[in-house]
Image: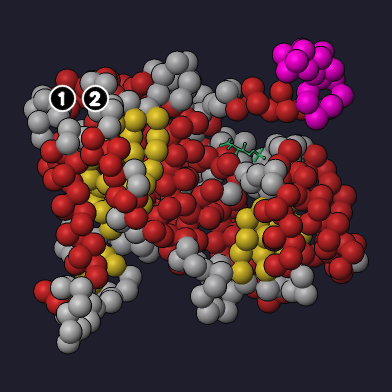
Amino acid sequence: MQEKGILTQMEVKISEKFLKGFVSETALEVIAPEIEAAQKKVLDKSGEGSDFLGWRDLPVDYDKDEFARIEDAAERIRNMCDVFVVIGIGGSYLGARAAIEYIKSPLYNTLKKDTPDIYFAGNSISSSALCDLLKICEGRDVCVNVVSKSGTTTEPAVAFRIFRDLLEKKYGKAEAAKRIFATTDKARGALKGLSDRMGYETFVIPDDIGGRYSVLTAVGLLPLAVAGIDVSSMMKGAERAREELLFNTDINTNDCLKYAAYRNVLYRSGKVTEILVSYEPASQMLCEWWKQLYGESEGKDGKGLLPDSVIFSTDLHSLGQYIQEGLRNIFETVIDIKKSNDTVVIPEDPENVDGLNFLAGRELAWANDAALTATLFAHTDGNVPNIVLEVADRSEFTFGYMVYFFELACAVSGYTLGVNPFNQPGVEAYKKNMFALLGKPGYEDMKAALDARMN
Ligand code: PA5
């Protein structure tokens, strides 16, 4: 393991060095009262959508019996199957996938391991994606976790029909029921009803936790435990973040508040697109999770920062050009992971064909750091402000901490922006049109109106 520096305080620490010249020296002081008011809404549950603040105390107030049941089910699943299929969309899969890739590897399925392969289904309506996965399952033992709070979302519901059918044909109804696990509402909804009738083991998505804030509930915990991830350590990381960040109202010492503040300061200065940057491909799905969290929480009422993401240095060879010289309405938030999981030393080449012998003996992580620093200078020179978030490592503990950091910052930032960070009314628009076009009963008038617009 290579360490770049020891973090003495938090697992996620902000560096403001590359904001110099982009925000005034008094910017934090000026916005502090608004941030304080937004944090207060989270603390005393007085803001819009406050009945969805269950994630706030989750790290200390989770159902311990269910937690034990999750670990027990995970062990059974590991013993029962080669392939574990997690069916869900949006907040019902992004967090679990992000954690597996961040903590384990984006190549988790292909690496040698003693835990099942984990695939995600029901997050699109692509026949090819589904058929490829069905082929992967051929001749292998399969378990399924269907995750849907409402139980009626079309994408996962369709995928679940297909996998349920597959399991019932392969194992018979009784055995299939032992291989199907449902994570859904505790009492309501079509999925809960079906699970109770069929005898599937169920786990709960609490009423007061929305999909995009649910990774530390059974939604994330069951797939992660199946992957052999230490979910207790992850919860401890989130608990530490809660202790350090939730109650500290001093913007100068609370980096979570600072992050929420700088996003709003930059937004008000015309930097309306935030690009989350990581130099670690294992963070790709973390970026997708973050995009959903911030995009759904803030993009409404004609407002909101547009969340985008890149993996560098990969994307320095694609979007890098735009970031350096395109429209100047962007800022970057760089995740600087301080500890690399692995060590690779660049070898000496006696012929030095590529002229790179000056790097011989150096660790690749050192070169990656150089790319990070070089890019920070280049992009700030190109008029793109950079917030740097120094993240300790890729451990379970740090992941849990980071999840809480981003969730709390999102709530505070959303309230500062003047929106309800916990609803997503805009997601319904496409759904209604799709139901109409698919011929769902009750949508006949809408279908006629859409058909008329098509012609
Ligand atoms: O964050 C959210 O609330 C959404 O992304 C939902 O998670 C997503 O729409 C899936 O909904 P459900 O879990 O009800 O199937």
Q: Magenta stretch: residue 445 in it?
A: yes
Question: What range is drawn magenta here?
Answer: 436-455
The residue at 47%/52% (across/down) is 285
Q: Residues within 10 Å of mark 1 (few under 14, many from 20)?
A: some
Marks 1 and 2: in contact by CB < 8 Å?
Answer: yes
Count of marks, rendered view: 2
Q: Is residue 30 above or below residue 143?
A: above
The answer, for residue 230, to whether it is visible in the render is: no
The residue at 57%/23% (across/down) is 426
Q: Is residue 158 above or below residue 227?
A: above
Depth check: 138 or 212 in front?
138
Rendering coords of residue 187 (x, y %):
74, 40
The residue at 40%/24% (across/down) is 304
Rendering coords of residue 271 (x, y %):
27, 26
Which quadrant contains ligand 1?
Answer: top right
The residue at 29%/50% (across/down) is 316
Specify whether 321 is left or right of 213: left
Depth check: 269 or 214 in front?
269
Rendered image quadrant of residue 424: top right
Residue wearing tag 2? 265
* Alpha carbon separation for disc pair 2 and 1: 7 Å
The answer, for residue 251, to whether it is visible in the render is: yes
Q: Is residue 299 above or below residue 343?
A: above
Q: Secondary structure at mark 1?
A: helix
Amino acid type, residue under disc 1 in the picture: Ala
Q: Magenta stretch: residue 454 in it?
A: yes
Specify whether 434 is left or right of 441: left
Instruction: Indicate yes or no: mark 1 CB to ligand 1 under 8 Å.
Output: no
Amino acid type, residue under disc 2 in the picture: Val
Specify whether 315 is left or right of 228: left
Q: Which mark is residue 27?
A: 1
